[in-house]
Image (cartoon, helix red, strand yellow):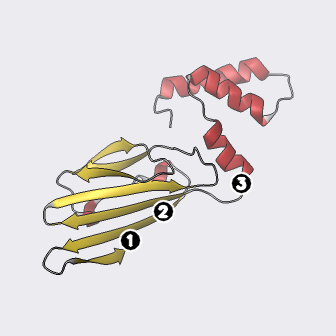
Amino acid sequence: MIDNDSLWWSVLRGIQQEFRHATVSGEEIVAAISRRTGTDYRYFFDQYLKYPGVPVLEVVVSSQGNDVTARYRWKADVKEFRMPVRVTLEPETYSWIRPTTGWQEVKLRGVSPTEFRIAQECFYADLNLSWVYLDPRLRGETERPGH
């Protein structure tokens, strides 16, 4: 989520120096991470530390003719949950999307529905991925569950 190795290691070293020889709470660690990165990560730690279930990334990739879009959102216990993830918006290239708990949509460029990938190894969450092929001749849709 921080996507900056030097900042991440600086944060870890700073926390170790600031709190060595001290008993600290989770809230103090979260506040220190947020302060040192300049970003409020309470939503992230609240979801993973205060609730038993992991968030679910829901993604529906739809195709109508040459137009391919991905709709996505987080299904999470924390209303403000907004963890970014990396996906293939273009062939063989991962880009960041920033899902929230509300539906969002993005057009894919040169990626078929089955070529759409999510860098699942980069986050701990469940995934609900499905494909919808819209056929204008049938004026309906056919849905195929993802993997």
Element at badge 3?
A: loop
Residue 147 rendering spot, x and y as whole percentages: 41, 70
Residue kind at label 2, given as amino acid type: Leu
Give above or below for 34 relative to 91: above
Give above or below for 88 relative to 33: below
Label 3, label 2: how many angstroms apart (C-alpha)?
A: 17 Å
Which numbered circle lies on residue 51?
3
Residue kind at label 1, given as amino acid type: Gly
The residue tagged 2 is 127
**For the point 75% across and 18% down, which residue is it?**
18
Q: Using the rendered image of the protein, determine whether residue 28 is visible from the camera's viewpoint.
A: yes
Q: Residues within 10 Å of mark 2 (few under 14, many from 20)?
A: some
**For the point 76% across and 28% down, which residue is it?**
28
Residue 85 rendering spot, x and y as whole percentages: 44, 46
Q: In this view, does 87 lie to the left or right of 78?
A: left
**For the point 47% across and 51% down, which residue is it?**
102
| Sequence-wise first label, 3 or 2 | 3
Residue 129 rendering spot, x and y as whole percentages: 41, 66
Q: Using the rendered image of the protein, determine whether residue 117 is visible from the camera's viewpoint.
A: no
- Say which quarter of the image contains residue 63: bottom left
Q: Residues within 10 Å of mark 1 (few under 14, many from 20)?
A: some
| Sequence-wise first label, 1 or 3 | 3
Which numbered circle lies on residue 73?
none
Mark 2 and mark 1 in contact? Answer it, CB < 8 Å: yes
The residue tagged 1 is 146
Element at badge 1?
A: loop
Element at badge 2?
A: strand
